[in-house]
Image (spheres, rainbow, N blue to C red):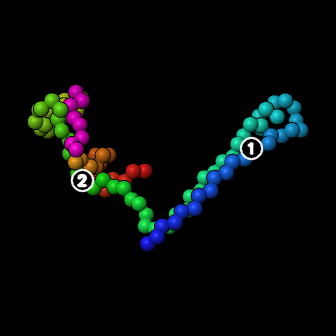
Amino acid sequence: MRQTASRWAGATIIPGLKNGNGFTRRLTSGFNLSAITILQSGNPFFVGAYNPLSLVDTAGVTVTQANYQSELAAGHFAFAANSGNYSADGDNNNVPK
């Protein structure tokens, strides 16, 4: 499938109220409005992390249920290279938001 893309960008200065006292002119002047629109065809690009959470104890300690809290408080945990589930919520279907 051939992908196509159309892009549009624009900006305009919004004039302030010229008929008013100095406060009103200052309050309503100096605003810009800008927009960027991109329209694309083709298959969507989707990024996800489907691997389960895998932590490594950087102090070389075997993590057990008894010492988990103390190791966590000491900052001895790091994500393993193949780790997923970065929110650590038990759902392995993490998608950036």
Question: Which residue is tagged 2?
Answer: 51
Q: Which residues are magenta?
A: 74-81
- 68 to the left or right of 38: left
Is residue 66 among what the camera can see?
A: no
Left or right? Give the position of 61 relative to 49: left
User: x, y percentage for residue 81?
Assistant: 22, 44
User: Seen in the image, is 11 located left or right of residue 29?
Assistant: left
Q: Is residue 68 above or below residue 4?
A: above
Is residue 25 one of those drawn in magenta? no
Residue corresponding to mark 1 = 13
Q: Is residue 40 visible?
A: yes
Instruction: Please name the amino acid that badge 2 sits on.
Output: Asn
Query: Hey, which quadrant is residue 19 in on the image?
Result: top right
Name the residue located 57 percent from the left edge and 62 percent from the top edge.
6
Above or below: residue 59 compared with residue 85: above
The residue lying furthest to the bottom in this view is 1
- Which is more N-terminal, label 1 or label 2? 1
Q: CA distance from mark 2 to mark 1?
A: 48 Å
Secondary structure of the residue carrying numbered label 2: loop
Q: Secondary structure at mark 1?
A: strand
Q: Residue at x 88, y 36 (%)?
A: 20
Pick the residue in front: 80 or 90: 80
Q: Nearer the viewer, residue 11 or 17?
A: 11
Q: Is residue 77 magenta?
A: yes
Residue lying farthest to the left in this orientation = 62
Q: Residues within 10 Å of mark 2 (few under 14, many from 20)?
A: some
- For the point 23% across and 37% down, the residue is 78
User: Label 1 crowding class (10 Å Cα cut-off): few <14, some 14-19, many 20+?
Assistant: few
Location of the N terminus by quadrant is bottom left
Measured from the top left, where is residue 25 in percent x and y? 82, 34
Please tell me the numbered disc located at residue 76. none
